[in-house]
Image (spheres, helix red, strand yellow):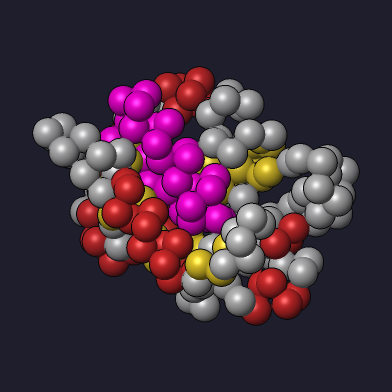
């Protein structure tokens, strides 16, 4: 990744991963989230990609947990998001957004060789998708300020890692290996220069 030349933003797509009501259903947990500006930052990215006429792809997670089970009323996009015409909403059953979906085919159809990643959770589905994307040859912008996570408790010891430490560890693991750590402002600036 570090030696790779940056792919033009015109060949980019935005992945909005697991921004679903399943996470807000537990109000106490949601209150401990890492990023209070999450919704604003994700919405800005979605709008910047739409204004540039570039693909936006939404992904929802389904598993056996009651709040994530297929058919649950919580497995839907959070109310601040709504797909525009032609924007797909994929459903995945794996941590990364590739293995259990046709995401790679959709990206190929749209000519996307560069991905911006936003969503929930920073160190799980977002990071895992970034790692797989990097291994598949995509140029990845990991937009940390458009992701969020929660404190993690070690089930063996009961030790708690604060959300801020989780985010920092994710950035350390991804930077220069699987992704660039990008900001909303930087990407929006690049996207604003895309010819209409």
Q: In this picture, is 180 found above or below 6?
A: below
Q: How many marks?
A: 0
Q: In this picture, is 7 found above or below 76?
A: above
Q: Residue 125 magenta-drawn?
A: yes
Query: Where is residue 144 drawn, in percent x and y?
Result: 39, 60
Q: Quadrant of residue 14?
A: top left
For the point 63% across and 65% down, the residue is 158
Q: Quadrant of residue 22?
A: bottom right
Q: Between 191 and 157, which is closer to the camera in this rendering?
A: 157
For the point 39% across and 54% down, the residue is 170
Q: Is 27 positioned to the left or the right of 179 in the image?
A: right
Query: Where is residue 102 drawn, in percent x and y?
Result: 58, 23
Q: Between 105 and 120, which is closer to the camera in this rendering?
A: 120
Q: Between 129 and 10, which is closer to the camera in this rendering?
A: 129
User: Does residue 74 show up?
Assistant: yes
Q: Quadrant of residue 78?
A: bottom right
| Range of residues picked out in magenta | 115-139
- Which residue ends up furthest to the front in the rendered image? 157
For the point 33% across and 55% down, the residue is 171
Query: Where is residue 87 drawn, in percent x and y?
Result: 57, 41
Query: Where is residue 189 drawn, in percent x and y?
Result: 24, 61
Quadrant where the N terminus lies?
top left
For the point 86% across and 51% down, the residue is 66
């Amino acid at each position: 990744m570090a030696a790779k030349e940056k792919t033009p933003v015109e060949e980019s797509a935005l992945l909005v991963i697991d921004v679903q009501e399943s996470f807000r259903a537990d109000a106490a947990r949601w209150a401990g989230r890492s990023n209070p500006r999450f919704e604003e930052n994700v919405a800005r990215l979605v709008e910047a990609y739409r204004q540039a006429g570039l693909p936006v792809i939404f992904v929802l997670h389904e598993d056996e947990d009651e709040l994530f089970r297929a058919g649950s009323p919580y497995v839907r996009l959070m109310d601040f998001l709504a797909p525009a015409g032609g924007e797909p909403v994929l459903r995945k059953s794996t941590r990364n957004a590739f293995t259990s979906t046709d995401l790679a085919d959709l990206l190929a159809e749209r000519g996307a060789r560069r991905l911006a990643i936003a969503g929930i959770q920073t160190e799980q589905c977002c990071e895992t998708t970034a790692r797989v994307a990097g291994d598949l040859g995509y140029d990845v912008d990991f937009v940390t300020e458009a992701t969020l996570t929660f404190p993690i408790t070690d089930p063996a010891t009961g030790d708690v890692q604060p959300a801020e430490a989780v985010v920092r560890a994710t950035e350390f693991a991804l930077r220069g290996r699987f992704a660039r750590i990008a900001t909303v402002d930087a990407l929006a600036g690049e996207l604003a220069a895309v010819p209409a």
